[in-house]
Amino acid sequence: MHVLTVLDHPNPTSFSAAVAQRFMEGAQAAGHTVELTDLHAEGFNPLWSMEDIERDAQARDPADVVAEQARIERADALCLVFPLFWWGMPSMMKGWVDRVWTWGWAYDQLDDPNRSLLRPRSGVLLVPAGARSDEMDAAGYKAALETVWMNGTFGYFGLSPRRLEVLNGSSGSDARRQALMDRSYDAGFTLLPPDPAV
Ligand SMILES: Cc1cc2nc3c(=O)[nH]c(=O)nc-3n(C[C@H](O)[C@H](O)[C@H](O)COP(=O)(O)O)c2cc1C
């Protein structure tokens, strides 16, 4: 498979950047080809603007959006890597989602969250988070993210199968961080093919 990894972190030596790297190494070890979209390094503009709104009338997306869509189109699997910020996406990843996955290109109906205009792609979200997993489960944050991301966003985008891996305790001990790196590698190595049924 051809695997596109999209990274949101301004620091190339961050934990998140290392997660993306390990994921890609795992995917390559499994025989896949990899491509990286490093949103900060590439200077992606995450701000939704009048240009995006006017595209609805012209049915033509801005050039930077079209370039991102082309990367998605040639991928069989997607991996998004971003740190958990305020129980959501940081602004760069949020802007990439808002601007790139456009109505009429990715989806055209909102009544069925498992229908996309795009062919199915395997999808994984690798999300470093400071909180412990038991804290997140107890407070309902993990269930909330499963609902809004897995059901409410990435179904419309044709990601199937799709899964969310919250990398809890990312600022913990060296042993903890190493275990999370191993999980990131495994996520790449065990990547499933797209679900043909969707
Ligand atoms: C602005 C901001 C908001 C954050 N919000 C959360 C949060 O809601 N939940 C959480 O578990 N961790 C939160 N964190 C912690 C980060 O997710 C965690 O430190 C992550 O490892 C950062 O990625 P990095 O190590 O690659 O920089 C937040 C950190 C920052 C800077």
Image: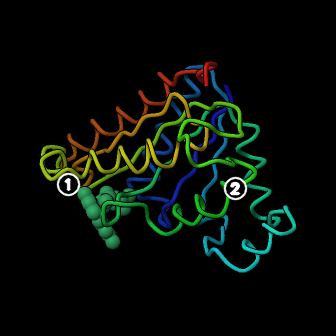
Residue drawn at x 65%, y 36% is 34
Provide the residue designation for mark 2. Answer: 103
Mark 1 surroundings: few (<14), some (14-19) or many (≥20) residues within 10 A: some
> Above or below — where is 192 with respect to 123?
above
The quadrant in which residue 13 appears is bottom left
**52 sits to left or right of 156:** right
Residue drawn at x 51%, y 25% is 191
**Element on which disc 2 rests:** loop
View quadrant of ligand 1: bottom left
> Above or below — where is 46 with respect to 118?
below
Precedes in sequence: disc 1 or disc 2:
2
Amino acid carrying label 1: it is: Ala
**Quarter containing the N terminus:** top right
Residue drawn at x 61%, y 75% is 47
Provide the residue designation for mark 1. Answer: 131
The answer to whether mark 1 is within 8 Å of ligand 1 is: yes
Return the x and y of residue 66 as percentages of the image width and height. Answer: 79, 57
Mark in the foreground, 1 or 2: 2
Q: Nearer the viewer, residue 190 or 138?
A: 138
Q: Nearer the viewer, residue 48 or 19?
A: 48
